[in-house]
């Protein structure tokens, strides 16, 4: 019988989300953190989140919130958490030395066929897996926050990750209802942050040049490119915007090349310009209103996720 046990190491924001996603697909989930109190608090929060998801019709899978909760167990030791697991999702803070320490422990505890995936946003998997005896089972499975409403997961192999491990991880992610993409090799920023930083860099440049103010730059995304990109990426968009991609490049290739040559240089986000951008953002959303605005964003993402389920 296929093992259905998942180990989640680190019960913070991302560990909790993974626990809910796995429970939604009917997996038994073991949750571990450095203190029992942290694990207990995480399970209480998961209970509230599962009930809120059920109330808004966004709970995953066929099990009720109460049934999903019974699938999630807090563990007192890493050994208890990881023993016999099919798949480990590591969710400890973004710190290379800490990751190395945790991976050395996981290496001793995992079975020879346990997949070990890191949630890291930007640490290359080769940096914490090189010296492990189970290194061919290690990869990155990078989620996007909040993973319940934003389903992308980037699967990133180290040079020694076995291809079949990536294939198995991809199947598991699909089973959860996430949308995995598999990078052929590790690269700084993976794919999502490389694209995000390219956009951020140009937004910074346009603000610095005084071409648009902060609110109008953000409107270019939220009212222009963003709605389109919620359903279709830039490459397919180009394909549709002419008689196919080849024709698009014939028509617009020269323009794209000439405009691209004028894109802003790579720069550090600091100094006087940072003060100006920051002030405009604070006028829009003061720090004491950040939580409220995050809740609004999550509601919008939930509505979009519902819409995408139905089209
Ligand atoms: P977090 O600080 O909310 O949670 C980290 C948890 O790990 C804490 O509960 C901490 O007590 C626990 N921890 C620390 N040392 C540990 C150890 N040795 N063993 C077990 N648990 C330990 O952080 P987070 O936001 O959940 O981020 C976790 C990982 O996910 C990071 O690598 C981060 O880059 C990545 N990630 C975060 C986001 C995000 O938006 N927060 C998005 C994608 C990926």
Image: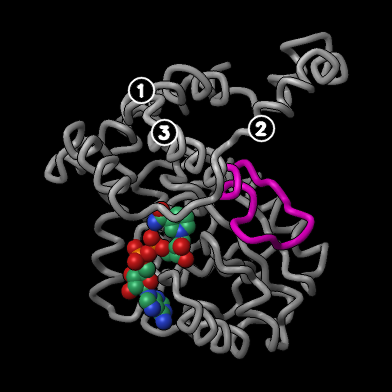
Residue 141 vs residue 220: left or right?
right
- Residue 126 makes an appearance in the image: yes
Tell me residue 12's x, y (percent).
Answer: 35, 63
Q: Disc 1 designates what residue?
A: 216
Q: Which residues are magenta?
A: 179-195
* Residue at the image position 82 percent from the left and 63 percent from the top: 163
Q: What residue do we see at 37% from left, 29% from top?
A: 210
Q: Earlier in the sequence, mark 1 or mark 3?
A: 3
Q: Kindly identify which residue carries mark 2.
A: 260
Precedes in sequence: disc 1 or disc 2: 1
Residue topped by disc 3: 209
Q: Position of residue 136 (x, y in %)?
A: 76, 76
State the residue in front, 138 or 62.
Answer: 138
Mark 1 or 2: the one toward you: 2
Residue 195 pos. (x, y %)? 59, 43
277 sits left or right of 286 in the view: right
């Amino acid at each position: 019988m296929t093992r259905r046990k998942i180990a989640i190491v680190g019960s913070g924001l991302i560990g909790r989300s993974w626990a809910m996603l796995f429970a939604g697909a009917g997996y038994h989930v073991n949750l571990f953190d450095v203190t029992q109190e942290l694990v207990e608090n995480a399970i209480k929060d998961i209970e509230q989140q599962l009930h809120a998801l059920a109330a808004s019709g966004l709970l995953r899978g066929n099990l009720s919130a109460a049934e999903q909760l019974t699938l999630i167990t807090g563990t007192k030791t890493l050994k208890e958490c990881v023993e016999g697991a099919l798949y480990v999702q590591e969710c400890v803070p973004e710190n290379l030395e800490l990751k190395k320490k945790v991976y050395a422990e996981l290496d001793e505890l995992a079975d020879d066929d346990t997949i070990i995936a890191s949630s890291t946003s930007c640490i290359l998997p080769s940096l914490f897996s090189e010296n492990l005896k189970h290194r061919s089972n290690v990869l990155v499975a990078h989620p996007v926050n909040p993973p319940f409403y934003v389903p992308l997961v980037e699967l990133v192999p180290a040079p020694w990750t076995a291809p079949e491990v990536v294939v198995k991880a991809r199947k598991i992610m699909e089973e959860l209802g996430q949308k995995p993409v598999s990078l052929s090799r590790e690269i700084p920023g993976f794919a999502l942050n490389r694209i995000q930083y390219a956009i951020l860099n140009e937004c910074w440049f346009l603000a610095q040049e005084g071409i648009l103010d902060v609110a109008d730059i953000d409107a270019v995304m939220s009212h222009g490119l963003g709605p389109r990109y919620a359903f279709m990426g830039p490459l397919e968009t180009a394909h549709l915007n002419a008689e196919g991609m080849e024709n698009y490049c014939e028509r617009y290739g020269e323009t794209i090349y000439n405009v691209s040559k004028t894109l802003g240089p790579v720069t550090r986000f600091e100094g006087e310009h940072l003060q100006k951008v920051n002030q405009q953002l604070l006028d829009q959303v003061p720090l004491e209103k950040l939580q409220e605005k995050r809740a609004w964003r999550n509601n919008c993402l939930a509505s979009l996720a519902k819409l995408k389920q139905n089209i």
